[in-house]
Amino acid sequence: MLSIRPIPLLADNYGWLLQDETGFTAFVDPAEEGPTAAAIEAAGGRLDMILLTHHHADHVAGADALRARFGAKVAGNVADAHRLPRLDQPVRPGGRLEVGRNAAEVIDTPGHTRGHIAYFFASGPVALVGDTIFSLGCGRLIEGTAEEMFASLRRLAALPGESLVCCGHEYTLANARFALSLRPDDAALKRRAEEAKRSRASGEPTVPTRLEEECRLNPFLVAPNAAEFARIRALKDRF
Ligand code: ZN
Ligand code: FE
């Protein structure tokens, strides 16, 4: 069994703490050292691996210090090795990564950045998607085209519907406002927005969500083609 939970970092980032039944521990996207190390100490004080989704500082800044402190091996996309922290386990999109007893498929998800990757554990099923999908939203197109990002979203949407979607930020309330501006009468969307409000009011994360729910409610996953995706992305950029 793979257990996974979000660790709030910086203002609105999430790192993800993964542990199997043997105590093998991995951490995805350590934005900063202090709160990440505190979460690891509370979970048994062991950190075997660090998984990176993309090179932005709010996903990697704690990696070097955590490697030194816990002896963790750092995994990330070899294509971005020049701008990631030092990689002990370079991975390639389309490849696999052993994470203790579990294995992750490395999925190519360019769009937010050129070298962005996601990690999918079929044994969860769990998808660690970085800044590609957020609950009810998607990452901004900083280095990629709408076509690339749309293709990345379709690749993730093809994973099993029950997969937990573990994203890099707590953006759900703002994303819900935008999604409701497109579909103001969507009852399921309204319910999701209310649920997210209650979670935030009690200090709880709104993620992870299930992929099948995102495929129904997330406007960027509902978009039927790249042109419609591009139109909605442009609207969101100005929202
Ligand atoms: Zn980013
Ligand atoms: Fe980010």
Image: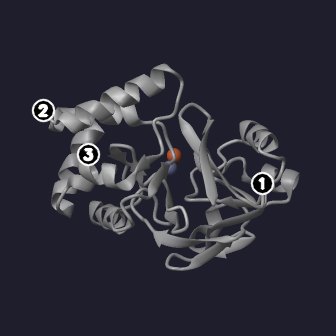
Q: Which element type, helix, strand or loop, lies under badge 2?
A: loop
Q: Which residue is mark 1?
A: 64
What amino acid is at disc 2? Answer: Asp
- Name which of mark 2 and mark 3 comes first in the sequence: 2
Q: Which element type, helix, strand or loop, lies under badge 3?
A: helix
Is residue 32 positioned above or below 101 on the image? above
Q: CA distance from mark 3 to mark 1?
A: 37 Å
Q: Which element type, helix, strand or loop, lies under badge 1?
A: helix
Label 1 near label 3: C-beta < 8 Å? no
Taking 234 as reference, is 15 left or right? right
Is residue 81 positioned above or below 198 on the image? below
Q: CA distance from mark 2 to mark 1?
A: 47 Å
Q: Which residue is mark 2?
A: 185
What amino acid is at disc 3? Answer: Leu
Q: Which residue is mark 3?
A: 217
Is residue 211 positioned above or below 121 on the image? above
Ligand 2 under 8 Å from disc 2 Cβ: no
**From this viewpoint, is residue 233 visible?**
no
Label 1 near label 2: C-beta < 8 Å? no
- Name which of mark 2 and mark 1 comes first in the sequence: 1
Q: Residues within 10 Å of mark 3 (few under 14, many from 20)?
A: many
Q: Position of residue 190 (x, y in %)?
A: 24, 31
Q: Position of residue 96 (x, y in %)?
A: 58, 77
Q: Residue at x 53, y 72 (%)?
A: 106
Q: Position of residue 73 (x, y in %)?
A: 77, 65
Foreground tag (2 vs 1) = 2
